[in-house]
């Protein structure tokens, strides 16, 4: 099990995100030839605190979203929509109860090889 479907579910239901990306929200890597703008969701770490009685059964995941676009204004707007959708989200998504909060880190860059701009944002997800 993973927290990635939680993030994908929230972003796919967020009208400001899908107004920019359509259905182009991917896990780990975009499909070859994907047209910008799109979002890639990357799970960087997941752990479950171990207590004296065993696992706490409330895993914590560190998730990175990467917004890709042809220009800086697009990735800035898309990144803002992602933050608005995910920050302080609480609920049940795809059968998993989850809480999402924003984590440290928000950066922009330009990928010269692909000629795309990116906005990279980090989140924490607690889910069960």
Image: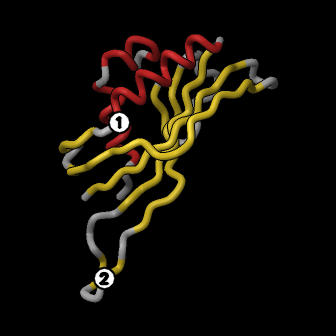
Q: Quadrant of residue 93?
A: top left
Q: Earlier in the sequence, mark 2 or mark 1?
A: 2
Q: Quadrant of residue 68?
A: top right
Residue at the spot x=42%, y=56% of the render? 61
Q: Residues within 10 Å of mark 1 (few under 14, many from 20)?
A: some
> Can you say whether 71 is above or below 113 in the image?
above
State the count of labels.
2
Task: Give me the disc on residue 87.
Answer: 1
Residue at the spot x=42%, y=27% of the render? 82
Q: Position of residue 6 (x, y in %)?
A: 32, 43
> Can you say whether 47 is above or below 42 in the image?
below
119 left or right of 79 in image? right
Q: Position of residue 122 (x, y in %)?
A: 50, 42
Q: Which residue is mark 2?
A: 51
Q: How is the image coloured?
A: secondary structure
127 left or right of 33 in image? left
Q: Secondary structure at mark 1?
A: loop
99 left or right of 7 in image? left
110 left or right of 34 in image? right
Q: What is the distance, in whole Å, between disc 2 and disc 1 at their CAs?
A: 28 Å
Q: Secondary structure at mark 2?
A: strand
Q: Residue furthest bottom?
A: 52
């Amino acid at each position: 099990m993973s927290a990635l479907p939680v993030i994908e579910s929230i972003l796919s239901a967020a009208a400001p995100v899908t107004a920019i990306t359509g259905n182009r929200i991917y896990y780990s890597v975009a499909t070859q030839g994907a047209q910008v703008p799109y979002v890639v969701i990357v799970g960087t770490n997941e752990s479950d605190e171990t207590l004296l009685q065993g696992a706490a059964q409330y895993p914590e995941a560190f998730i990175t979203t990467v917004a890709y676009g042809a220009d800086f204004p697009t990735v800035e707007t898309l990144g803002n929509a992602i933050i608005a959708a995910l920050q302080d989200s609480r609920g049940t998504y795809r059968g998993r109860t989850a809480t999402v909060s924003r984590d440290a880190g928000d950066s922009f860059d330009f990928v010269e090889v692909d000629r795309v701009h990116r906005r990279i944002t980090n989140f924490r997800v607690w889910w069960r």
